Amino acid sequence: MAAVNHISSKLPKHETSIFTVMSKMAYEHKAVNLSQGYPNFDTDKHLKELVYQAMLDGYNQYAPLAGVSPLREQIVDKIESLHGKKYDKNTEVTVTNGATQALFLAITAFINPGDEVIVLKPAYDSYEPAIELNGGIPVLVQLEGKDYKLNFEAIKEKISSKTRMLIVNTPHNPSGNVFSKEEMLHLEQLLEGTDIILLSDEVYEHIIFEEAKHYSASAFPNLSKRAIVCASFGKTFHNTGWKMGYCVAPEELMAEIWKVMEVNVFCVHHPTQRAFAEYLKTPQHYLGLRDFYQEKRDKFLALIKDTGFKALPSNGTYFQLLDYSRISNEPDIEFSRRLIEEFGIASIPVSVFNKDKVDYRQLRFCFAKTDDTLKEAAEILKKVK
Ligand code: PMP
Ligand code: GLN
């Protein structure tokens, strides 16, 4: 008999993340892994040296709760130069354990039992469990059509007296859509006069293509006054395993986030913060990402041009959606499993992110990979008929 007989799960419907499932299967089948979103090339050696140097310099004890001052300063300066909004480095920034922790802190700080949180689907898989753990109710709105367009009427219909928060993600994982300026203005209008907090997940802020521009919620005064903006150094500096990120928000919101941060982890890895404070002094380190990933994306698209897969348009992120309906009518979960088992390539079935698991016969491929891996992947995809 078990020692503890009555476990009342707080996440009874929770399944293992699709990223874990697919990466594990890829490993077992020695498949080329374009599923979970992470680069298979290394972070800058200079950045690693900066971390080591910070350790040698003795930055090995707790950092302040909100993060070290030089890093907070770099973050607020970067946001000001890119988006024209000056956050107070002493009261409006927190360095976190990746964007995932920033999202969790924001949801935990503000969502009470019975509060509704509007989530636009398809969505990153940490939002809904975080809402549920806090007794909140995720209210799901599916983005429209096979290309996942924003429909403000559909969002408006879901706003009720219980709506406490709206979560948006731009550039968007998995579709690669980037909110336009008009859409941000529309969002501003939609929320004006409400008490709704905007949780803006902007982890792919620097991975944008062609003429697209990233419009941060921080750039719009009537959004920034109610927004918690989350960012990830992991995405920007090719070190997802370091789990470093941050959030910015108006002082009165940040004060509540700090209460949760204090009892959650208190602070994050100190030497790495010192290293990022130094590394961020060179804007090319993040502004160069655009060309770097555009080249990878274009290379991948050129390589798969003659396959049966059809690429969906995208303006950002390091993901590419491919429609496989010309090849097969199998459900995407089955098809993606077959691609691993029979062909040796791993991707993510998009239905898992969608409301009611709607399946448009699309798979998500991560192209944050070396050119050799992209070539190898394309050779495999050419054989899938
Ligand atoms: N939001 C989105 C949309 C993501 O794709 C990811 C990446 N895993 C995260 C948040 C989490 O970022 P981090 O790895 O910094 O926790
Ligand atoms: N955000 C990454 C993705 O979308 C995965 C993050 C994770 O594995 N938790 O693939």
Image (spheres, rainbow, N blue to C red):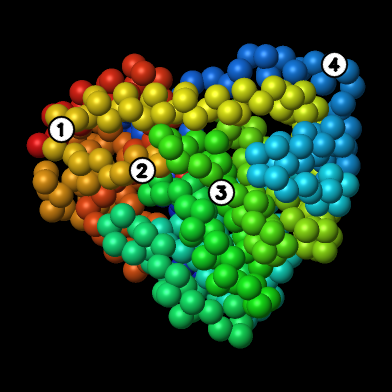
Look at 57% across and 70% down and name the residue there: 189
Q: CA distance from mark 2 to mark 4?
A: 43 Å
Find residue 215 and name its label: 3
Crowding near pointer 3: few (<14 within 10 Å), some, many (20+)? many
Q: Residue 136 appears in which quarter of the rendering?
A: bottom right
* Left or right: where 158 falls relative to 78: left
Q: CA distance from mark 3 to mark 4?
A: 39 Å
Q: Nearer the viewer, residue 17 or 197?
A: 197
* Left or right: where 200 falls relative to 62: left
Mark 2 in CB contact with mark 1 (< 8 angstroms)? no
Query: Sequence-wise, which precedes: disc 2 or disc 3?
Result: 3
Local secondary structure at mark 1: loop
Which residue is denoted by mark 4 in the rendering? 56
Query: Sequence-wise, which precedes: disc 1 or disc 4?
Result: 4
Which residue is denoted by mark 1 in the rendering? 307
Query: Sequence-wise, which precedes: disc 2 or disc 4?
Result: 4
Crowding near pointer 2: few (<14 within 10 Å), some, many (20+)? many
Look at 84% across and 44% down and name the residue there: 89
Query: Sequence-wise, which precedes: disc 3 or disc 4?
Result: 4
Foreground disc of the pair 3, 4: 3
